[in-house]
Image (cartoon, rainbow, N blue to C red):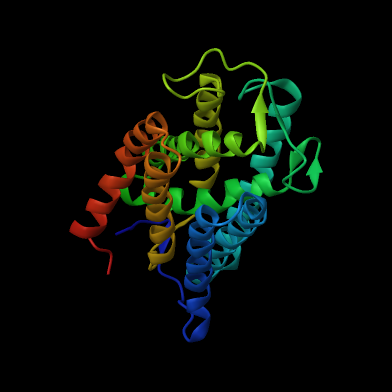
Amino acid sequence: MYSGPHSDRGGVPSGWIVYIPWALAIVTILTQIAWILVDERLRLALTISSVITFFLASATHAYISRGMTWTAGYLAITLVASLVIEVVGVLTEFPFGSYAYSTDLGPALLGVPLLIPVAWSMMAYPVLLAARRLAGPGLPTVLVGGFLFASWDLFLDPQMVRQGYWTWSDATWNLPGVEDIPLQNFLGWLLAGLAIMWMLERLPRKVAKDGVPTLMLSWVYASNVLAAAAFFADWPVAVWGGICMGAVVIPYWWRLWSQPQW
């Protein structure tokens, strides 16, 4: 349980409003399940809609459980920082390597689809909360959160490159079995994740019922391992992502079971 000068419980809204994040989370999960089942032509629409509903689940849960000021800070940090990082990446090849987005993902700014910072923001919220449960304030949370955030990309990039949403011009230096994506990209994600977690860790620590972000983080991990292994038959991605992301998610599950907050 969080304690100290940067902790507070705050008021928790009651009534039907508390179910909004749960409804959005369930819609996200159902949309992602449908993505596997539908025709290729429908997958882009489902990809976009699942990112938006996941983002709204994170944002509404943050508002309900942590308040407007906290949520405004979280959104400002994640949306602005991720957009800046991506624009720098596209224009300078640092820190991800030489890559480019397709036009499929909708409106873009300086070569970066606006959907991309929304995706960064949706995932940063459950990652931050998991890191805070597992690690102490400050640098430990930043290190755990940055690693967890980067490990998510071990699943994300192979799938999105397979769909043609972005590509690298040079991927000769890569993880064994993970083709078309340079190792520099994953190292860049680690650097970017550490930077974003460092900024988010400046936000106050507040005790709350975090079932929605826990569900979404658990779903992202379990569904991506299953999809990589069973649907895409991409065992290197399943192994790399399963081990790296699981190095944080599995201890997080144990912490939730052995040391419940409430």
Q: Is residue 21 visible?
A: yes
Q: Is 47 situated left or right of 143 in this image?
A: right
Looking at the image, is 87 positioned above or below residue 226? above
Looking at the image, is 55 positioned above or below residue 198? below
Looking at the image, is 19 positioned above or below residue 237? below
Q: Residue at x 62, y 52 (%)?
A: 43
Q: Is 161 situated left or right of 123 in this image?
A: right
Towards the viewer: 154 or 248: 154
Q: Residue at x 67, y 38 (%)?
A: 165
x, y percent for residue 144: 38, 38
Q: Is residue 203 visible?
A: no
x, y percent for residue 121: 58, 50
Q: Which residue reaches farthest bottom?
A: 15
Looking at the image, is 249 positioned above or below residue 100? below
Q: Which residue reaches farthest top?
A: 172
Q: Residue at x 54, y 64 (%)?
A: 57
Towards the viewer: 139 or 115: 115
x, y percent for residue 242: 34, 38
Q: Which residue reaches farthest left?
A: 258
